[in-house]
Image (cartoon, coloured by chain):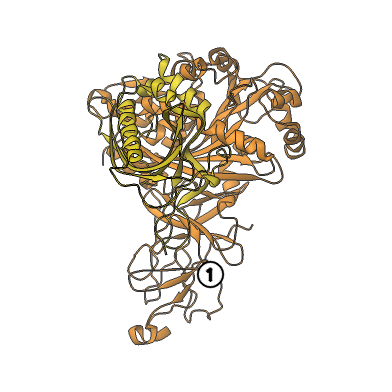
Chain colours: A yellow, B orange
């Protein structure tokens, strides 16, 4: 019996093109150079997302990025799944992400004008080697604080993430992000932001 | 209780007292007089395709298990144990032959019948003390379906769903019956917005006027083929029965041309021709109007639109969504948003249509994001004392004397039922809020209590039976008709 169902990219109708590289072995020690590189990458990315430098963010994604956040559902213990069949909040490729980001550059993306105040709280980072030395799997916990307007209540999203980082021409890029959101009903007016 | 007659009178005149969008007393009235009587969507049959499948859905504060029982019948049961009131099913979805209450272990089949009552003899003296045979979880007072959409009503005397929908059923078919195979509904995505539930329903019912302003950004990033401002004005709004919506005016051409124009493949178009009536085909083909957003009173909305979803293609691709504005309070709404697609559509179409939905609507949709920003802001402002002085002018399309700015379309121009107008107007928003007043003005129904297994016999809900209660093989003695597959 398990209470943990890893996100299965195969349940995504749109993610068939994405890398299927999986983790191998136990977590890398925290002083392993690969872990340090992966951790640094995630921390830098976190600041990028807080500062909403989305064009820069698009530049650290591989062309085959699969950015996937299935809808979480509450199911009985032992039912074997905890995401809604065939439905996600995000099921994105680089093109659809680029459209979302292009929208923020227009003068009419009202949901982010005035912009949200964002703070991505990153933790629990652990890194796994894969069978490919240029790819690492990195797990992390993410708590996103979002404040909109002046008097509205702030909103939070808590999620676990499993990322695939790939080294391309000496730079680490994000090749896959699976987001396991911890609520089935999001208490946020939308996900105009990224996790 | 406050006299709301002045508020209702103003609404009927198309002058909307702003406070109705954030008013605790109004919300209490809505709970007691509207949501306790209207038909409420709970699930589509495709969400529970197999025997034992269930989903748990709410009507405001009331939780219902919507299940397909072991005989394949669809049932909706109040999710509260007959004994001490614990919620018997605490998962949102799954497959189960029975539900067991965690408090004292009473258990129920997936059709609602009690199958286990621990220590029945020792605790109650058996059937003489507690007549359990034939007892079921309280069924929804009324249940009915249309094109596989399952609705329940808390009113045991509710009119049939078909009568409730009235002529809107003509339009509902465009969204929910594109072939004999029916629908595939996926989701829902669920999220909470700090907005009053009525705003979304009104917006989807007829607000063609907001799109050029609110949704400029999606045109600017190339998601749509043509600028929307002009297209929207050329379309019409229609209201029929208990719902209404908006349309786009398409370039001249046949039915097939029109469906191809919005991106349907020929095989789907052929099935639509077999499924829809000549009048339904005529609205699109001869009249040149394509249905877009719509609302069913009070809180269901639908969308049909056709963005570009692929990088190196100018082709558009249509998507459908059904959503529910589930009220939480006077200033908070849970949005449930389903992706809808014809079950017989090609797999490639389904995938791209799903992508189109995700890009445009739902929790991450680029259309919906900007809508909600407006609605939250409106709701906030409506709470104050100044909002009690302001009547919002919702008379667009109508002159001071009540005559239309543009006359309604004649039968030669629009073959659909109801009343349709080209151009900007708030006909539909007025219709929706007039229905709302109709419900809020009516005194609440008398509701009889149901008592289970004991001395006091209730007479509503139909779960009780005359003594001696039936044998163990008794079918649920509900007064509800289960929805046949």
In the displayed structure, A76 sits above or below B206; it is below
Q: Position of residue B115 (x, y in %)?
A: 47, 76
Nearer the observer, A68 or A41: A41
* Up-down relation of residue A10 to residue A50 (above or below): below
Depth check: give the residue in front, B114 or B307. B307
Where does the N terminus of chain B fall, quadrant-wise?
top left
The residue positioned 41% from the left and 54% from the top of the image is A74
Q: Residue at x 43, y 24 (%)?
A: A58
Camera sees residue B194: no
- The residue under label 1 is B476
Answer few, some or many: residues within 10 Å of disc 1's Cα (few below 14, many 20 plus, some between 14 and 19): many
Q: What percent of the width, then of the height, locates residue B242?
A: 54, 37
Of all chains, the one bearing label 1 is: B
Image quadrant where residue A45 sits: top left
Camera-nearest residue between B175 and A127: A127
**Residue in the image at 65% along x and 31% along y:** B417
Q: In the image, what residue occupies the spot 61% across and 66% down?
A: B71
Coordinates of residue B228 in the picture (x, y in percent): 55, 16
Residue B152: percent from the left, percent from the top?
50, 52
Residue B30 horizontal side relative to residue A21, left or right: left
The quarter in which the C terminus of chain B is drawn is: bottom right
- Answer yes or no: is residue B204 visible: yes
Drawn side of residue A31 relative to residue B241, left or right? left
Quadrant of res B386: top left
Q: How many marks?
A: 1
Res. B378 image quadrant: top left
Judging depth in this view, the residue of B36 and A179 nearest the camera is A179
Q: Is residue B384 left or right of residue A69?
A: left
């Amino acid at each position: 019996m398990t209470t943990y169902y890893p996100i299965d990219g195969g349940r995504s109708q749109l993610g068939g093109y994405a890398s299927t590289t999986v983790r191998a072995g136990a977590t890398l020690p925290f002083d392993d150079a690969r872990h340090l590189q992966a951790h640094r990458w995630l921390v830098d990315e976190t600041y990028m997302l807080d500062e909403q430098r989305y064009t820069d963010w698009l530049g650290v994604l591989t062309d085959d990025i699969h950015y996937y956040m299935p809808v979480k559902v509450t199911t009985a213990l032992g039912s074997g799944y905890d995401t809604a069949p065939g439905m996600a909040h995000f099921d994105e490729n680089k093109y659809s992400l680029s459209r979302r980001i292009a929208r923020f550059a227009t003068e009419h993306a009202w949901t982010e004008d005035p912009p949200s105040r964002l703070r991505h709280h990153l933790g629990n980072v652990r890194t796994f080697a894969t069978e490919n030395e240029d790819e690492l799997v990195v797990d992390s916990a993410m708590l996103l604080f979002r404040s909109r307007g002046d008097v509205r209540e702030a909103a939070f999203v808590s999620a676990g993430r499993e990322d695939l980082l790939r080294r391309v021409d000496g730079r680490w890029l994000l090749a896959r992000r699976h987001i396991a959101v911890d609520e089935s009903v999001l208490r946020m007016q939308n996900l105009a932001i990224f996790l | 209780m406050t006299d709301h007659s002045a508020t209702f009178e103003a609404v009927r005149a198309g002058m909307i007292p702003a406070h109705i969008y954030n008013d605790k007393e109004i919300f209490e009235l809505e709970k007691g007089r509207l949501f306790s009587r209207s038909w409420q969507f709970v699930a589509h049959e495709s969400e529970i395709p197999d025997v034992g499948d269930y989903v748990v859905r709410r009507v405001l504060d009331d939780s219902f298990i919507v299940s397909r029982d072991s005989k394949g019948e669809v049932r909706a049961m109040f999710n509260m144990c007959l004994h001490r009131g614990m919620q018997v099913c605490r998962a949102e979805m799954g497959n189960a032959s029975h539900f067991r209450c965690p408090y004292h272990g009473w258990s129920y089949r997936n059709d609602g019948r009690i199958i286990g009552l621990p220590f029945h003899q020792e605790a109650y003296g058996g059937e003489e003390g507690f007549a359990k045979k034939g007892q079921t979880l309280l069924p929804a007072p009324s249940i009915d379906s249309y094109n596989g959409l399952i609705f329940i009503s808390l009113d045991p005397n509710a009119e049939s769903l078909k009568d409730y929908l009235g002529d809107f059923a003509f339009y509902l078919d465009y969204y929910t019956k594109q072939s004999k195979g029916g629908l595939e509904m996926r989701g829902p995505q669920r999220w909470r917005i700090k907005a009053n539930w009525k705003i979304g329903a009104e917006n989807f019912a007829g607000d063609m006027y907001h799109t050029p302003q609110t949704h400029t950004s999606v045109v600017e990033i190339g998601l749509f083929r043509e600028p929307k401002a002009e297209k929207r004005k050329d379309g019409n709004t229609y209201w029929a029965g208990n719902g209404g919506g908006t349309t786009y005016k398409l370039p001249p051409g046949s039915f097939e041309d029109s469906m191809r124009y919005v991106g349907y493949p020929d095989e789907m178009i052929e099935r639509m021709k077999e499924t829809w009536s000549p009048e339904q085909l005529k609205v699109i083909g001869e009249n040149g109007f394509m249905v877009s957003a719509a609302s069913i009173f009070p809180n269901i909305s639908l969308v049909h639109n056709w963005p570009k979803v692929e990088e190196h293609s100018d082709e558009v691709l249509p998507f459908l969504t059904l959503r529910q504005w589930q009220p939480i309070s006077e200033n908070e709404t849970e949005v449930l948003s389903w992706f809808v697609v014809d079950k017989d559509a090609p797999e490639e179409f389904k995938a791209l249509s799903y992508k189109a939905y995700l890009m445009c609507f739902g929790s991450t949709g680029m259309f919906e994001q900007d809508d909600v920003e407006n609605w939250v802001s409106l709701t906030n402002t409506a709470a104050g004392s100044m909002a009690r002085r302001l009547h919002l002018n919702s008379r667009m399309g109508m002159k001071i004397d009540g005559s239309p700015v543009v006359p309604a379309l004649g039968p030669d121009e629009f073959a659909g039922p109801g009343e349709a107008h080209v151009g900007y107007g708030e006909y539909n928003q007025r219709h929706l809020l007039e229905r709302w007043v109709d419900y809020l003005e009516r005194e609440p129904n008398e509701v009889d209590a149901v008592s289970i297994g004991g001395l006091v016999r209730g007479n509503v809900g139909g779960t009780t039976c005359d003594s001696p209660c039936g044998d163990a093989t008794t079918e649920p003695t509900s007064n509800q008709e289960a929805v046949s597959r």
